[in-house]
Amino acid sequence: MTDAQETDAAPAAQAPSADSAPAPVPLLEPREGIPPVTASAEELARVTEAFAAGSGPVAVDAERASGYRYGQRAYLVQLRRAGAGTALVDPVACPDLSGLDEALAGSEWVLHAATQDLPCLREIGMRPTRLFDTELAGRLAGFARVGLGAMVDNVLGYALEKGHSAVDWSTRPLPEPWLRYAALDVELLVDLRDALEVELSRQGKLEWAREEFAAIAAAPAPPPRKDPWRRTSGMHKVRRRRQMAVVRELWFARDAVARKRDVSPGKVLTDAAIVEAALAMPTQARALSALPGFGQRMGRKQLDQWQAAVERARALAEEELPQQGQATSGPPPPRSWADKDPAAAARLSAARAAVTRHAEELNLPQENLLTPDTVRRLCWEPPAAVSVESVSGALRGLGAREWQIAQTAELLRAALSSPGA
Protein backbone atom coordinates (compact mmCIF):
# COMPACT_ATOMS: atom_id res chain seq x y z
CA MET A 1 0.00 0.00 0.00
CA THR A 2 1.37 3.41 -0.95
CA ASP A 3 1.60 6.33 1.48
CA ALA A 4 -1.21 8.12 -0.33
CA GLN A 5 -3.42 5.05 -0.25
CA GLU A 6 -2.73 4.54 3.44
CA THR A 7 -3.65 8.15 4.18
CA ASP A 8 -6.89 7.79 2.22
CA ALA A 9 -7.76 4.60 4.12
CA ALA A 10 -7.16 6.12 7.56
CA PRO A 11 -10.24 6.96 9.65
CA ALA A 12 -10.98 10.66 9.83
CA ALA A 13 -10.08 12.27 13.15
CA GLN A 14 -12.90 13.88 15.09
CA ALA A 15 -12.51 16.76 17.48
CA PRO A 16 -13.12 15.72 21.10
CA SER A 17 -16.45 16.82 22.47
CA ALA A 18 -18.10 16.72 25.86
CA ASP A 19 -21.52 16.40 24.22
CA SER A 20 -23.16 13.03 23.70
CA ALA A 21 -21.62 11.38 20.66
CA PRO A 22 -22.83 8.59 18.38
CA ALA A 23 -21.85 5.07 19.31
CA PRO A 24 -18.25 4.29 18.30
CA VAL A 25 -17.65 2.15 15.23
CA PRO A 26 -16.12 -1.23 16.19
CA LEU A 27 -12.63 -1.67 14.75
CA LEU A 28 -12.45 -5.40 14.06
CA GLU A 29 -9.62 -5.95 11.55
CA PRO A 30 -6.29 -4.27 10.73
CA ARG A 31 -6.33 -2.44 7.39
CA GLU A 32 -3.97 -4.91 5.70
CA GLY A 33 -5.00 -7.93 7.76
CA ILE A 34 -3.00 -9.59 10.53
CA PRO A 35 0.70 -9.58 9.62
CA PRO A 36 2.80 -12.70 10.20
CA VAL A 37 4.91 -12.75 13.34
CA THR A 38 8.54 -11.81 12.66
CA ALA A 39 10.55 -14.58 14.31
CA SER A 40 13.82 -15.01 12.38
CA ALA A 41 16.84 -12.93 11.43
CA GLU A 42 15.83 -12.93 7.77
CA GLU A 43 12.29 -11.78 8.52
CA LEU A 44 13.60 -9.10 10.90
CA ALA A 45 15.95 -7.81 8.18
CA ARG A 46 12.98 -7.41 5.81
CA VAL A 47 10.94 -5.58 8.45
CA THR A 48 13.89 -3.32 9.25
CA GLU A 49 14.33 -2.45 5.58
CA ALA A 50 10.60 -1.72 5.16
CA PHE A 51 10.44 0.55 8.21
CA ALA A 52 13.61 2.38 7.20
CA ALA A 53 11.96 3.12 3.86
CA GLY A 54 8.70 4.23 5.48
CA SER A 55 7.81 7.79 6.33
CA GLY A 56 6.43 9.81 9.21
CA PRO A 57 5.96 8.82 12.86
CA VAL A 58 6.26 5.19 13.99
CA ALA A 59 3.55 3.72 16.21
CA VAL A 60 5.12 1.38 18.79
CA ASP A 61 3.64 -0.87 21.46
CA ALA A 62 4.86 -3.83 23.49
CA GLU A 63 3.10 -6.70 25.25
CA ARG A 64 4.44 -8.18 28.47
CA ALA A 65 3.40 -11.18 30.56
CA SER A 66 2.85 -9.44 33.88
CA GLY A 67 1.41 -11.81 36.45
CA TYR A 68 2.70 -14.84 34.53
CA ARG A 69 6.45 -14.46 34.04
CA TYR A 70 9.31 -13.06 36.10
CA GLY A 71 10.21 -9.46 35.31
CA GLN A 72 8.75 -7.11 32.74
CA ARG A 73 10.35 -8.26 29.49
CA ALA A 74 8.59 -7.77 26.16
CA TYR A 75 7.03 -10.82 24.50
CA LEU A 76 5.69 -9.02 21.44
CA VAL A 77 6.56 -5.69 19.83
CA GLN A 78 4.11 -4.03 17.45
CA LEU A 79 5.07 -1.28 14.99
CA ARG A 80 3.25 0.62 12.28
CA ARG A 81 4.46 3.25 9.84
CA ALA A 82 3.19 4.81 6.64
CA GLY A 83 4.67 2.95 3.70
CA ALA A 84 5.65 -0.05 5.85
CA GLY A 85 2.33 -1.20 7.28
CA THR A 86 2.22 -3.13 10.56
CA ALA A 87 4.84 -5.52 11.93
CA LEU A 88 4.57 -7.92 14.86
CA VAL A 89 8.02 -8.86 16.14
CA ASP A 90 8.73 -11.73 18.53
CA PRO A 91 11.54 -10.47 20.83
CA VAL A 92 12.05 -13.98 22.21
CA ALA A 93 13.08 -15.27 18.80
CA CYS A 94 14.66 -11.90 17.87
CA PRO A 95 16.10 -10.62 21.16
CA ASP A 96 18.26 -7.86 19.63
CA LEU A 97 16.27 -5.14 17.87
CA SER A 98 19.08 -2.57 17.85
CA GLY A 99 19.26 -2.80 14.05
CA LEU A 100 15.58 -1.87 13.81
CA ASP A 101 16.24 0.92 16.32
CA GLU A 102 19.03 2.28 14.08
CA ALA A 103 16.72 2.16 11.07
CA LEU A 104 14.27 4.37 12.97
CA ALA A 105 16.93 6.82 14.19
CA GLY A 106 15.59 10.36 14.32
CA SER A 107 11.98 9.26 13.77
CA GLU A 108 9.24 10.22 16.18
CA TRP A 109 7.85 7.23 18.05
CA VAL A 110 4.20 7.27 19.06
CA LEU A 111 3.45 5.30 22.22
CA HIS A 112 0.54 5.20 24.66
CA ALA A 113 1.76 5.46 28.28
CA ALA A 114 5.38 5.46 27.11
CA THR A 115 6.95 5.05 30.54
CA GLN A 116 5.33 1.61 30.85
CA ASP A 117 6.84 0.26 27.64
CA LEU A 118 10.22 2.02 27.46
CA PRO A 119 11.98 -0.19 30.06
CA CYS A 120 11.19 -3.44 28.25
CA LEU A 121 11.99 -1.84 24.87
CA ARG A 122 15.40 -0.71 26.15
CA GLU A 123 16.18 -4.32 27.11
CA ILE A 124 15.94 -5.34 23.45
CA GLY A 125 17.88 -2.37 22.07
CA MET A 126 15.08 0.07 21.22
CA ARG A 127 15.57 3.62 22.54
CA PRO A 128 13.62 6.50 20.96
CA THR A 129 15.16 9.95 20.86
CA ARG A 130 11.85 11.61 19.96
CA LEU A 131 8.40 10.51 21.04
CA PHE A 132 4.76 11.46 21.32
CA ASP A 133 2.86 9.93 24.25
CA THR A 134 -0.85 9.80 23.45
CA GLU A 135 -1.84 9.07 27.06
CA LEU A 136 0.10 12.04 28.42
CA ALA A 137 -1.23 14.19 25.60
CA GLY A 138 -4.75 13.22 26.66
CA ARG A 139 -4.02 14.23 30.25
CA LEU A 140 -2.65 17.61 29.20
CA ALA A 141 -5.66 18.14 26.93
CA GLY A 142 -8.01 17.56 29.86
CA PHE A 143 -9.56 14.20 28.95
CA ALA A 144 -11.13 12.47 31.94
CA ARG A 145 -10.38 8.95 30.60
CA VAL A 146 -7.00 8.42 28.96
CA GLY A 147 -6.79 4.66 28.37
CA LEU A 148 -6.12 3.81 24.74
CA GLY A 149 -9.62 2.45 24.15
CA ALA A 150 -11.27 5.51 25.67
CA MET A 151 -9.05 7.90 23.72
CA VAL A 152 -9.64 6.17 20.38
CA ASP A 153 -13.37 6.21 21.13
CA ASN A 154 -13.58 9.85 22.25
CA VAL A 155 -11.18 11.34 19.71
CA LEU A 156 -11.54 9.14 16.63
CA GLY A 157 -14.94 7.53 17.10
CA TYR A 158 -13.74 3.92 16.94
CA ALA A 159 -14.05 1.12 19.50
CA LEU A 160 -11.03 -1.09 20.17
CA GLU A 161 -11.53 -4.59 21.55
CA LYS A 162 -9.50 -4.77 24.78
CA GLY A 163 -10.24 -8.33 25.89
CA HIS A 164 -6.67 -9.64 25.59
CA SER A 165 -4.73 -6.96 27.49
CA ALA A 166 -3.98 -9.20 30.50
CA VAL A 167 -3.29 -12.55 28.80
CA ASP A 168 -0.04 -14.51 29.02
CA TRP A 169 1.90 -13.05 26.08
CA SER A 170 4.73 -15.55 26.62
CA THR A 171 2.41 -18.20 25.10
CA ARG A 172 3.76 -19.72 21.88
CA PRO A 173 2.38 -19.83 19.30
CA LEU A 174 0.29 -16.73 19.95
CA PRO A 175 -3.39 -17.28 19.07
CA GLU A 176 -4.74 -15.38 16.09
CA PRO A 177 -7.26 -13.32 18.16
CA TRP A 178 -4.39 -12.07 20.31
CA LEU A 179 -2.36 -11.11 17.24
CA ARG A 180 -5.37 -9.26 15.82
CA TYR A 181 -5.72 -7.37 19.11
CA ALA A 182 -2.00 -6.54 19.11
CA ALA A 183 -2.06 -5.24 15.53
CA LEU A 184 -5.11 -3.09 16.26
CA ASP A 185 -3.33 -1.49 19.22
CA VAL A 186 -1.01 0.36 16.79
CA GLU A 187 -3.54 0.66 13.96
CA LEU A 188 -4.76 4.13 14.96
CA LEU A 189 -1.95 5.43 17.16
CA VAL A 190 -0.61 7.85 14.55
CA ASP A 191 -4.16 9.02 13.72
CA LEU A 192 -4.72 9.61 17.43
CA ARG A 193 -1.41 11.45 17.69
CA ASP A 194 -2.35 13.78 14.83
CA ALA A 195 -5.77 14.58 16.31
CA LEU A 196 -4.31 15.23 19.77
CA GLU A 197 -1.65 17.49 18.31
CA VAL A 198 -4.41 19.62 16.78
CA GLU A 199 -6.31 19.70 20.09
CA LEU A 200 -3.23 20.60 22.13
CA SER A 201 -2.39 23.35 19.67
CA ARG A 202 -5.95 24.69 19.94
CA GLN A 203 -5.61 24.82 23.74
CA GLY A 204 -2.16 26.44 23.60
CA LYS A 205 -0.56 23.38 25.24
CA LEU A 206 1.39 21.84 22.37
CA GLU A 207 4.77 23.21 23.47
CA TRP A 208 4.07 21.97 27.00
CA ALA A 209 3.49 18.49 25.63
CA ARG A 210 6.67 18.63 23.57
CA GLU A 211 8.69 19.50 26.68
CA GLU A 212 7.13 16.57 28.52
CA PHE A 213 7.83 14.17 25.67
CA ALA A 214 11.45 15.33 25.41
CA ALA A 215 11.92 14.79 29.15
CA ILE A 216 10.58 11.23 28.92
CA ALA A 217 12.84 10.40 25.97
CA ALA A 218 15.91 11.84 27.71
CA ALA A 219 15.25 10.30 31.14
CA PRO A 220 17.80 7.65 32.18
CA ALA A 221 16.69 4.21 33.24
CA PRO A 222 15.60 4.34 36.90
CA PRO A 223 17.95 2.73 39.44
CA PRO A 224 16.88 -0.51 41.14
CA ARG A 225 14.37 0.11 43.92
CA LYS A 226 15.90 0.11 47.39
CA ASP A 227 14.40 -2.44 49.79
CA PRO A 228 11.76 -3.70 47.34
CA TRP A 229 10.42 -6.08 49.99
CA ARG A 230 8.95 -3.09 51.83
CA ARG A 231 6.33 -2.84 49.06
CA THR A 232 4.83 -6.22 50.02
CA SER A 233 1.07 -5.82 50.03
CA GLY A 234 -0.23 -5.81 53.62
CA MET A 235 3.09 -4.59 55.03
CA HIS A 236 1.25 -2.04 57.19
CA LYS A 237 0.15 -4.90 59.45
CA VAL A 238 3.77 -5.80 60.27
CA ARG A 239 4.85 -3.75 63.28
CA ARG A 240 7.85 -5.44 64.90
CA ARG A 241 11.34 -5.39 63.42
CA ARG A 242 11.81 -9.16 63.69
CA GLN A 243 8.55 -9.67 61.83
CA MET A 244 9.81 -7.26 59.18
CA ALA A 245 12.92 -9.44 58.91
CA VAL A 246 10.68 -12.44 58.19
CA VAL A 247 9.03 -10.51 55.37
CA ARG A 248 12.43 -9.61 53.98
CA GLU A 249 13.79 -13.17 54.12
CA LEU A 250 10.66 -14.68 52.58
CA TRP A 251 10.53 -11.98 49.87
CA PHE A 252 14.09 -12.68 48.73
CA ALA A 253 13.63 -16.47 48.95
CA ARG A 254 10.50 -16.18 46.82
CA ASP A 255 12.26 -13.87 44.35
CA ALA A 256 15.09 -16.37 43.85
CA VAL A 257 12.62 -19.19 43.15
CA ALA A 258 10.55 -17.02 40.78
CA ARG A 259 13.63 -15.90 38.86
CA LYS A 260 14.86 -19.48 38.48
CA ARG A 261 11.45 -20.75 37.33
CA ASP A 262 10.70 -17.62 35.26
CA VAL A 263 7.29 -17.13 36.80
CA SER A 264 5.61 -14.21 38.53
CA PRO A 265 6.61 -14.11 42.23
CA GLY A 266 2.94 -14.06 43.20
CA LYS A 267 2.53 -17.50 41.63
CA VAL A 268 5.27 -18.87 43.88
CA LEU A 269 4.00 -17.37 47.15
CA THR A 270 1.46 -14.62 47.67
CA ASP A 271 2.15 -11.39 49.53
CA ALA A 272 -0.69 -12.29 51.90
CA ALA A 273 1.05 -15.56 52.80
CA ILE A 274 4.32 -13.75 53.50
CA VAL A 275 2.58 -11.33 55.86
CA GLU A 276 0.75 -14.18 57.63
CA ALA A 277 4.04 -15.96 58.25
CA ALA A 278 5.63 -12.76 59.55
CA LEU A 279 2.80 -12.15 62.00
CA ALA A 280 2.68 -15.77 63.22
CA MET A 281 6.46 -16.42 63.37
CA PRO A 282 5.97 -20.24 63.20
CA THR A 283 8.67 -22.37 64.81
CA GLN A 284 8.27 -25.43 62.58
CA ALA A 285 7.08 -26.31 59.07
CA ARG A 286 3.94 -28.01 60.41
CA ALA A 287 2.79 -24.76 62.03
CA LEU A 288 3.64 -22.88 58.84
CA SER A 289 1.51 -25.28 56.79
CA ALA A 290 -1.55 -24.32 58.84
CA LEU A 291 -1.30 -20.67 57.78
CA PRO A 292 -3.29 -19.25 54.84
CA GLY A 293 -1.25 -19.50 51.64
CA PHE A 294 0.82 -22.50 52.81
CA GLY A 295 -1.94 -25.07 52.33
CA GLN A 296 -2.42 -28.62 51.18
CA ARG A 297 -0.89 -28.35 47.72
CA MET A 298 2.47 -27.19 49.04
CA GLY A 299 4.99 -30.01 49.32
CA ARG A 300 7.31 -30.65 52.26
CA LYS A 301 10.33 -29.39 50.35
CA GLN A 302 8.63 -26.06 49.68
CA LEU A 303 7.46 -25.72 53.26
CA ASP A 304 10.98 -26.41 54.48
CA GLN A 305 12.48 -23.67 52.31
CA TRP A 306 9.95 -21.11 53.58
CA GLN A 307 10.45 -22.22 57.18
CA ALA A 308 14.22 -21.89 56.67
CA ALA A 309 13.67 -18.25 55.67
CA VAL A 310 11.66 -17.68 58.87
CA GLU A 311 14.47 -19.27 60.90
CA ARG A 312 17.07 -17.02 59.27
CA ALA A 313 15.08 -14.02 60.42
CA ARG A 314 14.78 -15.50 63.92
CA ALA A 315 18.56 -15.94 64.12
CA LEU A 316 19.48 -12.35 63.20
CA ALA A 317 21.16 -10.21 65.81
CA GLU A 318 19.22 -7.14 66.93
CA GLU A 319 21.46 -4.76 64.97
CA GLU A 320 20.85 -6.77 61.78
CA LEU A 321 17.09 -6.29 61.86
CA PRO A 322 15.55 -3.82 59.41
CA GLN A 323 14.61 -0.39 60.70
CA GLN A 324 10.97 0.54 61.13
CA GLY A 325 11.03 3.37 58.61
CA GLN A 326 12.82 3.49 55.28
CA ALA A 327 15.36 6.29 55.15
CA THR A 328 14.42 8.95 52.64
CA SER A 329 16.22 11.98 51.28
CA GLY A 330 13.08 14.09 51.06
CA PRO A 331 10.87 15.86 53.58
CA PRO A 332 8.90 13.95 56.23
CA PRO A 333 5.28 12.90 55.60
CA PRO A 334 3.05 16.00 55.40
CA ARG A 335 0.84 14.74 58.25
CA SER A 336 3.74 15.42 60.65
CA TRP A 337 4.54 18.91 59.40
CA ALA A 338 2.18 20.74 61.75
CA ASP A 339 4.15 19.40 64.73
CA LYS A 340 7.64 19.51 63.22
CA ASP A 341 7.43 22.86 61.41
CA PRO A 342 4.12 24.78 61.52
CA ALA A 343 5.42 27.40 59.08
CA ALA A 344 6.26 24.71 56.51
CA ALA A 345 2.79 23.21 57.00
CA ALA A 346 1.24 26.62 56.29
CA ARG A 347 3.39 27.02 53.17
CA LEU A 348 2.36 23.59 51.93
CA SER A 349 -1.34 24.28 52.49
CA ALA A 350 -1.15 27.56 50.57
CA ALA A 351 0.95 26.09 47.76
CA ARG A 352 -1.26 23.03 47.31
CA ALA A 353 -4.37 25.20 47.11
CA ALA A 354 -2.77 27.53 44.56
CA VAL A 355 -1.49 24.70 42.32
CA THR A 356 -4.80 22.82 42.49
CA ARG A 357 -6.77 25.95 41.63
CA HIS A 358 -4.54 26.78 38.65
CA ALA A 359 -4.64 23.20 37.39
CA GLU A 360 -8.43 23.36 37.38
CA GLU A 361 -8.28 26.62 35.43
CA LEU A 362 -5.98 24.98 32.87
CA ASN A 363 -8.15 21.83 32.72
CA LEU A 364 -5.36 19.37 33.47
CA PRO A 365 -4.49 17.10 36.42
CA GLN A 366 -2.69 18.82 39.27
CA GLU A 367 0.14 16.25 39.19
CA ASN A 368 0.82 17.13 35.55
CA LEU A 369 1.02 20.83 36.32
CA LEU A 370 3.50 20.13 39.11
CA THR A 371 4.16 16.87 40.93
CA PRO A 372 3.12 16.73 44.61
CA ASP A 373 6.68 15.73 45.54
CA THR A 374 8.07 18.87 43.91
CA VAL A 375 5.60 21.05 45.82
CA ARG A 376 6.45 19.31 49.11
CA ARG A 377 10.20 19.66 48.66
CA LEU A 378 9.93 23.33 47.74
CA CYS A 379 7.73 24.09 50.76
CA TRP A 380 9.92 22.15 53.18
CA GLU A 381 13.11 23.89 52.07
CA PRO A 382 12.14 27.15 50.31
CA PRO A 383 14.77 29.57 48.97
CA ALA A 384 16.30 31.84 51.60
CA ALA A 385 15.07 34.90 49.71
CA VAL A 386 11.73 34.15 48.08
CA SER A 387 11.29 35.66 44.63
CA VAL A 388 10.05 34.50 41.24
CA GLU A 389 13.67 34.00 40.20
CA SER A 390 14.65 31.99 43.27
CA VAL A 391 11.50 29.87 43.11
CA SER A 392 12.10 29.26 39.41
CA GLY A 393 15.65 28.15 40.14
CA ALA A 394 14.48 25.82 42.90
CA LEU A 395 11.82 24.28 40.66
CA ARG A 396 14.37 23.81 37.88
CA GLY A 397 16.67 22.04 40.33
CA LEU A 398 13.82 19.73 41.28
CA GLY A 399 13.32 18.71 37.65
CA ALA A 400 10.33 20.87 36.69
CA ARG A 401 10.00 21.67 33.01
CA GLU A 402 10.14 25.26 31.77
CA TRP A 403 6.43 25.38 30.98
CA GLN A 404 5.63 24.23 34.51
CA ILE A 405 7.92 26.89 35.95
CA ALA A 406 6.30 29.59 33.82
CA GLN A 407 2.85 28.51 35.01
CA THR A 408 3.59 28.11 38.73
CA ALA A 409 6.58 30.21 39.84
CA GLU A 410 4.59 33.36 40.62
CA LEU A 411 1.73 31.59 42.39
CA LEU A 412 4.23 29.59 44.46
CA ARG A 413 6.15 32.75 45.32
CA ALA A 414 2.91 34.23 46.63
CA ALA A 415 2.12 31.05 48.58
CA LEU A 416 5.58 30.94 50.17
CA SER A 417 5.34 34.64 51.09
CA SER A 418 1.78 34.53 52.47
CA PRO A 419 1.13 35.36 56.15
CA GLY A 420 1.71 32.33 58.35
CA ALA A 421 4.06 30.76 55.81
Image: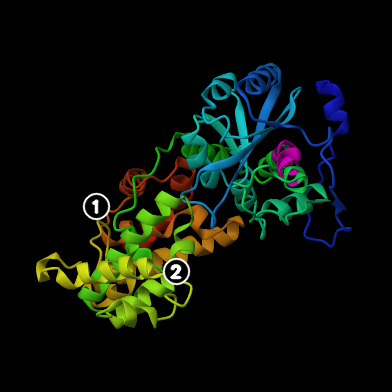
Instruction: Measure the alpha-carbon separation of dots 2 and 1.
Output: 51 Å
Residue marked by disc 1: 385
Say whether residue 184 is magenta: yes
Picture quarter containing residue 352? Answer: bottom left
Q: Residue furthest front?
A: 300
Label 2 sits on what residue type? Answer: Thr
Q: Secondary structure at mark 2?
A: loop
Residue 291 relative to residue 149: left or right = left
Q: Secondary structure at mark 1?
A: loop
| Residue 376 visible, this angle | no
Residue at 44 percent of width and 69 percent of height: 270
Give residue 407's position: percent from left, percent from top.
49, 49
Depth check: 342 or 126 in front?
A: 126
Quarter of the image with the C terminus is bottom left
Say whether residue 306 is magenta: no
Residue 195 relative to residue 294: left or right = right
Quarter of the image with the N terminus is top right
Give residue 154's position: percent from left, percent from top.
77, 54
Label 1 sits on what residue type? Answer: Ala
Give residue 117's position: percent from left, percent from top.
54, 43
Q: Nearer the viewer, mark 2 or mark 1?
A: 2
| Residue 242 visible, this angle | yes
Give residue 189's position: percent from left, percent from top.
71, 40
Residue at 68 percent of width and 19 percent of height: 46
Q: Residues within 10 Å of mark 2 (few under 14, many from 20)?
A: some
Magenta span of residues: 181-193
Residue 361 relative to residue 162: left or right = left
